[in-house]
Amino acid sequence: MTAREFEKRRIGRTDLEVTTLGLGCASLAGIFSAVPAEQARATVGHALDMGINYVDTAPQYGLGRSEHLVGDALRERRDGVVLSSKVGRLLKPVSAAEQDKGNWIDPLPFNQAYDYSYDGIMRSFEDSRQRLGIHRIDILYVHDIGVATHGVEGNKPLWAQLANGGYKALRELRDAGVVKAIGLGVNEWPVLMDAFALGDWDVFLLAGRYTLLEQTSLTPFMTTCIERGASVVIGGPFNSGILVGGDKFNYAKAPDEIVSKVRAIEAVCREFGVPLPAAALQFPLTHPAVCNVLPGPRSPAELDGILDWWDVKVPGDLWTTLAAKGLLAPGTPIPGGVA
């Protein structure tokens, strides 16, 4: 297979340009089921061979495993690649008996500790560069801050860490040119509105909240991004698998009302001869704030399947039919107008 010509979009007001399809590297670290190291490295290499230039990882993924594997794959191919990682978790070495593996099958021997303070973010950034074995990280996201992860009371002291020092650390790194863009990477959009009150951000990685199935972040978050000049990377475009034939939504078994809505969307896709996953993958890019869609294949073969969906031509009438049937939120941007 030869490299594709991907459209590129600029991140915020930076000079970074990313291909509209990226590679998320959480799955490669072995969540729920194991991924051999060589397979993970081969997947990253295959993405680069195909012309994808944006790769995202994080300390949390496999408790350091993802960053090590991504570093192995990128170290000799760094030029032209936009790399993002995340801050907010520090990894502490532990014995096997002490380790909390979570859903990771074969993580590295660490536990994670949340720290969004000035020193915590600086330490996390340096640790990531060590694990990657790469000097430059282009985009730094604050990872999983918000009530969805920490609860209302648990989030308060962590948000105070970010507001009282963590944001300053990020601004210093960006202003010094050490990183080119800063943002947050989360699964909930309200916390991103809180982030706007702290200052200026370049890009947000939002998983699952602006998809073919759910547009809850449309207003006020996405509209505010346009006003503030911030871009959005959409993670989890398949909503944990429900949009590719699975039964999971938001990492749990999908409720009946979600299953019914997916069936209704799939019926419209079938009417136009478009596979549901192809429509799900391409839908977020109809919004002008979105610069990239970030799926997480587990192998080169899975990536090839995603590229096949990417190549499907989706007619504009599919989006307008979904809107007419009330399957898109009012005001959703679609080619030729809004829902």
Image (cartoon, grey):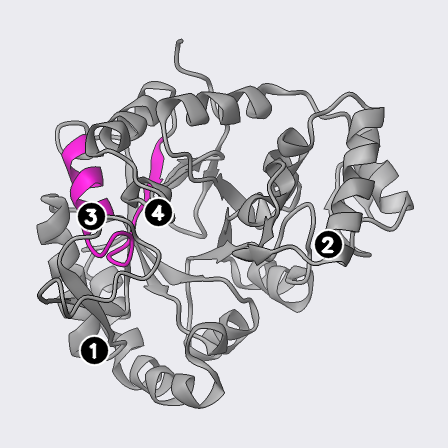
| Mark drawn on residue 47 | none
- Gap between marks 2 and 4 measured at Cα: 25 Å
| Snapshot quadrant of residue 223 | bottom right
Do labels 4 and 1 touch, CB within 8 Å? Answer: no
Numbered disc in front, either 4 or 1: 4
Observer-nearest residue: 10 or 293?
293
The residue wearing badge 3 is 65
Mark closest to the chain's N terminus, 3 or 4: 4
Instruction: Kindly identify the residue that appears in the image at 63 percent across and 48 percent down.
Output: 211
Do labels 3 and 1 touch, CB within 8 Å? Answer: no
Instruction: Kindly identify the residue that appears in the image at 40 percent across and 9 percent down.
Output: 1
- Gap between marks 1 and 2 measured at Cα: 41 Å
Mark 4, other Cα within 10 Å: few <14 / some 14–19 / many ≥20: many
* Kind of residue at badge 3: Arg
Do labels 3 and 4 touch, CB within 8 Å? Answer: no
Numbered disc in front, either 3 or 1: 3
Residue 261, given in percent of the width and then of the height, sits at 78, 49
* Kind of residue at badge 1: Tyr
Q: Which residues are magenta?
A: 53-73
The residue wearing badge 4 is 26
How many marks on residues?
A: 4
The residue wearing badge 1 is 118
